[in-house]
């Protein structure tokens, strides 16, 4: 839910600048995957604060529950069992919106103001303006937005924009018992991550690193990964996420080119008519027909 | 309605109804589709009861258009087979566009330009139908790459199609005495003799 008190950087399907006067700092949520114990307290806190209740699902043989994001589940823990360096590893990743600096959802959305990006980096859906087309799903490189079966509106993590607006951390951060989720300015979070990564490297995780993918301009939800060289291990976290070239083509070149071409045809037709005059049946042929009739 | 008993029948009532089902659904689709295409066109959705209704209705109208289009396509496909004289006509179409059609090669019921339009529109309609199904999220859930391909194809082909239909409509307005063929089915003999002489000979025996 968007709040007017937050400064807006960009809004969907809008060609004029949004409010530019104030420059608040960018925020970020840092998820330290290496400290996560998979307790799902964050899922519960999210559900509580945002007043969401996913149906009780069924066990599919792994710990994932709910098994996917939905209109009622804006964050889910993804559990992966893998073997790295000859050892079994149980990788747990809290999945949800990454709040990209260059959001594919916002770029794709055709409805003015249905998706907004605040100056602090939060990308938020305004369901009131959502038309239910699902273009945000098409545009997202992380497969995050979900269209509700009840109301055909798109939903996803809001990074608790309502809490952040009044100086509080997101609900998942507040509740995390191990401190695996932290919140602050993006700069501070990078520093916290750097300290943790140095620690992990000392402990043998040579490829530990920060996940803040450049392909989407960086994200406002970042991960500390023990295997930053292989993010795919964490339930297919994309290695180099970018807005698909197909989406860029669709929302980039096609729009102005097609609009200009159509305007050109309309104006061209008008001026052709004015310049050349109508193509009428010639007097000569009309006379021929009249002569035939007279015979 | 018979205006002049010697007028030539160009389309029967069923063909005309078929054409206008395609035409009306096309206009509805273009207006609602453009509203999702560029923010400048977004207010067009008000014609459909707002953006949500435009989103709900658009694909259903699309189904109507696709069905009506393919029926008319199959009815007219034989009449639109390209012949040597059609290619010749196309080569010299600049003369026609320049406003001088007196030396154009004799044409049957359709000229080379109309025939090309027919086939290209057929391809576009096929593209729109397939890509439209790919992005119809309310009822279908395809692989994300297919959906993205569908989205860009739907927008690009739609732009081509709208452009072609604008040319189609303009040609009908520009060539006087044409539009009535789709309103009440007939054209004057003089019109036929000037624009489609081979067809004129065929139907009048002259």
Image (tube, coloured by chain):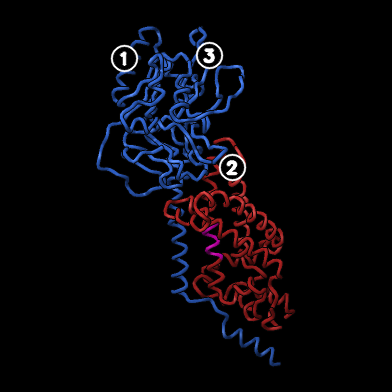
- Give the chain of mark 1: A
Residue A72 appears in the rendering: yes
First in sequence, mark 3 or 1: give its number.
3
Residue extending furthest toward the right: B205
- Name the residue beneath numbered marker 1: A195
- Residue B21, horizontal then vertical, whole percent: 64, 62
Magenta span includes A248: no
- To which residue does mark 2 refer? B138
Between A103 and A277, the residue placed more toward the observer is A103
Question: Quick check: A204 above or below B94?
Answer: above
Q: CA distance from mark 1 to mark 2?
A: 47 Å
- Please, is residue A163 above or below residue B109 in the view? above
Per the image, label 3 sits on a secondary structure element best described as strand
Location of residue A167 with respect to A126 vertically, above or below: above
Task: For mark 3, name the chain.
Answer: A
Report the magenta residues as a range: B161-168
**Of residues A222 and A84, the one drawn nearer to the viewer in this rendering:** A222
Q: Evaluate whether label 3 is on the same chain as label 1.
A: yes
- Neighbor class of circle 1 (other Cα within 10 Å; few <14, some 14-19, many 20+) is few
Q: Which chain is red?
A: B
- Going 56% across and 58% down the picture, which residue do you hit? B28
Is residue B159 something that shows in the picture? no
For mark 2, does the 10 Å Cα neighbourhood hold few (<14), some (14 to 19), or many (20 or more) residues? some
* Image location of residue A177, percent across then percent down: 41, 15
What colour is chain A? blue
Marks 3,1: beta carbons within 8 A: no
**Residue highlighted by disc 3:** A82
Q: Is residue A35 left or right of residue B184?
A: left
């Amino acid at each position: 839910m968007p709040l007017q008190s937050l400064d807006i950087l960009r809004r969907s399907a809008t060609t004029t600048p949004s409010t530019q006067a104030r420059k608040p700092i960018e925020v970020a949520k840092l998820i330290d995957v290496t400290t996560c114990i998979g307790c799902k307290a964050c899922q519960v806190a999210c559900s509580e604060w945002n007043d969401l209740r996913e149906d009780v699902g069924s066990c599919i043989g792994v710990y994932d529950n709910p098994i996917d994001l939905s209109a009622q589940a804006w964050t889910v823990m993804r559990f992966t069992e893998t073997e790295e360096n000859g050892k079994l590893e149980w990788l747990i990743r809290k999945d949800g919106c990454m709040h990209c600096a260059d959001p594919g959802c916002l770029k794709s959305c055709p409805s003015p103001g249905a998706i907004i990006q605040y100056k602090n980096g939060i990308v938020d859906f305004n369901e009131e303006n959502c038309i239910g087309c699902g273009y945000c799903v098409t545009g997202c490189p992380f497969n995050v937005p979900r269209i509700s079966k009840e109301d055909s509106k798109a939903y996803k993590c809001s990074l608790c924009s309502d809490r952040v607006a009044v100086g509080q951390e997101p609900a998942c951060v507040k509740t995390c018992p191990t401190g695996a989720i932290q919140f602050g300015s993006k700069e501070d979070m990078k520093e916290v991550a750097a300290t943790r990564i140095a620690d992990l490297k000392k402990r043998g995780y040579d490829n530990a690193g920060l996940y803040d993918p450049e392909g989407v301009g960086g994200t406002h939800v970042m991960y500390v990964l023990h295997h930053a060289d292989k993010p795919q291990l964490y339930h297919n976290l994309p290695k180099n996420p970018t807005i698909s070239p197909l989406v860029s083509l669709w929302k980039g070149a096609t729009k102005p080119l097609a609009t200009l071409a159509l305007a050109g045809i309309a104006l061209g037709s008008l001026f052709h008519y004015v310049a050349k005059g109508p193509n009428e049946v010639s007097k000569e042929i009309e006379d021929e027909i009249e002569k035939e009739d007279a015979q | 309605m018979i205006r002049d008993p010697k007028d030539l029948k160009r389309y029967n009532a069923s063909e005309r109804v078929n054409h206008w089902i395609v035409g009306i659904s096309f206009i509805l689709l273009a207006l609602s589709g453009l509203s999702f295409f560029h923010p400048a066109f977004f207010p067009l959705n008000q014609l459909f009861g707002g953006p949500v209704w435009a989103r709900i209705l658009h694909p259903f109208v699309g189904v109507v258009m696709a069905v009506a289009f393919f029926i008319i396509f199959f009815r007219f496909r034989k009449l639109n087979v390209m012949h040597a004289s059609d290619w010749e006509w196309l080569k010299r179409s600049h003369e026609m566009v320049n406003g001088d059609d007196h030396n154009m090669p004799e044409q049957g019921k359709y000229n080379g330009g109309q025939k090309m339009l027919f086939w290209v529109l057929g391809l576009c309609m096929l593209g729109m139908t397939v890509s439209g199904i790919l992005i119809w999220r309310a009822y279908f859930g395809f692989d994300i790459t297919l959906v993205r391909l569908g989205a860009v194809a739907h927008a690009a082909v739609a732009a081509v199609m709208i452009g072609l239909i604008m040319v189609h409509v303009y040609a009908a307005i520009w060539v006087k005495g044409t539009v009535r063929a789709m309103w009440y089915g007939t054209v004057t003999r003089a019109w036929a003799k000037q624009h489609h002489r081979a067809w004129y000979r065929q139907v009048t025996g002259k």
